[in-house]
């Protein structure tokens, strides 16, 4: 899905952090990386794209939908149906096993209906991310890297048209970083999805179509095209 931002102004509270984005367009199918120092607003922008927060003014359009104009329930349903989010802190439910964590979006909201072959899809997804033997394990018995891969499985299972991934390789060794990126690229490509990924791994940036550096967000962005 195409993403468009126009005249966006967002702040968490008066005088607190403020993000202004006059114009940003991400074409469908683009692999976009966000880089920049901690605290520069990368996660905030992902949250705005997902409709988790809404701007004080301006528009965020995802596909054909002005997300910021939807009411809370509508934004939530739209996000669950169309957008995958890999959270920086994973947001897994400790006492549930890996399978149930991957299925969580289907359990929490009927915007995503469960279908007959879903169990086998969960298995396949877990195999792709090397978690097949962990499906019955509670997530609090997994390493950080394994938990991160569970979060990635959960975001990918519904085949989202827009995948937002917040430092999804942050807890992985170099070999696994490339493997995870391969998976994210392959799976977004086969779904013709747009990928927006926050990363500190400058070694990975060559693989993206576009890179936005938040240190100079108010100047024209750099492009790798
Ligand atoms: P990054 O992901 O680039 O490290 P963030 O988008 O998480 O940056 O944060 C940008 C700024 O907004 C920081 O100064 C942070 O402290 C502040 N911030 C983030 N989330 C909240 C929140 N929920 N309420 C108030 N301030 C926040
Ligand atoms: Mg962040």
Image (cartoon, rainbow, N blue to C red):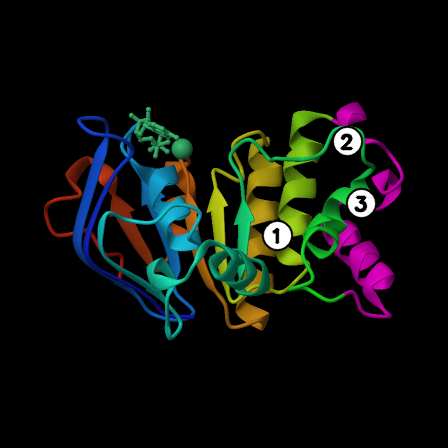
Residue nearest the viewer, comparing 12 with 137 = 12
Contact (Cβ within 8 Å) of mark 1 with mark 3: no
Residue 97 lies in quadrant: top right
Q: Position of residue 113 (x, y in %)?
A: 73, 67
Whether residue 131 appears in this view of the structure is no
Quick one: SS at disc 2? helix
The circle on residue 100 is: 3
Q: Position of residue 224 (x, y in %)?
A: 27, 57
Q: Determine which residue is flagged by label 2.
A: 139
Ligand 2 resides in the quarter of the picture at top left
Q: Work out which residue is located at the far left of the displayed protein and give it.
A: 219
Tell whether circle 2 marks a residue whose Cβ is less than 8 angstroms from ligand 2: no
Q: CA distance from mark 2 to mark 3?
A: 10 Å
- Report the magenta residues as a range: 114-142
Relative to 163, 81 lies left or right: right
Q: Position of residue 61 (x, y in %)?
A: 33, 65
Q: How many marks?
A: 3
Q: CA distance from mark 1 to mark 3?
A: 13 Å
Relative to 103, 44 lies left or right: left
The circle on residue 155 is: 1
Residue 128 within the segment the image draws in magenta: yes
Whether residue 165 appears in this view of the structure is yes
Residue 59 lies in quadrant: bottom left
Contact (Cβ within 8 Å) of mark 2 with mark 1: no
Q: Give the label, 2 or 3, closer to the camera.
A: 3
Residue nearest the viewer, comparing 185 with 159 = 159
**In what quadrant of the picture does the N terminus appear?**
bottom left
């Amino acid at each position: 899905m195409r993403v468009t931002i126009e005249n966006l102004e967002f702040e968490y509270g008066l005088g607190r952090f403020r993000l202004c984005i006059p114009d940003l367009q991400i074409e469908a199918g683009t692999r976009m990386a966000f880089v920049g120092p901690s605290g520069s607003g990368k996660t905030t922008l992902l949250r705005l794209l997902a409709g988790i927060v809404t701007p004080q003014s301006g528009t965020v359009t995802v596909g054909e939908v002005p997300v910021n104009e939807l009411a809370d329930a509508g934004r939530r349903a739209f996000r669950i149906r169309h957008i995958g989010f890999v959270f920086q802190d994973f947001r897994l439910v400790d006492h549930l096993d890996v399978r149930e964590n991957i299925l969580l979006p289907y359990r929490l909201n009927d915007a995503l209906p469960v279908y007959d072959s879903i169990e086998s899809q969960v298995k396949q997804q877990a195999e792709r991310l090397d978690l097949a033997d962990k499906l019955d394990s509670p997530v609090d018995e997994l390493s950080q890297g394994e938990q991160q891969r569970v979060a990635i499985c959960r975001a990918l299972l519904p085949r989202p048209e827009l995948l937002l991934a917040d430092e999804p390789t942050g807890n992985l060794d170099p070999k696994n970083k490339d493997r995870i990126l391969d998976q994210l690229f392959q799976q977004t490509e086969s779904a013709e999805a747009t990928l927006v990924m926050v990363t500190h791994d400058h070694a990975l940036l060559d693989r993206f179509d576009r890179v936005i550096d938040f240190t100079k967000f108010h100047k024209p962005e750099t492009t790798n095209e």
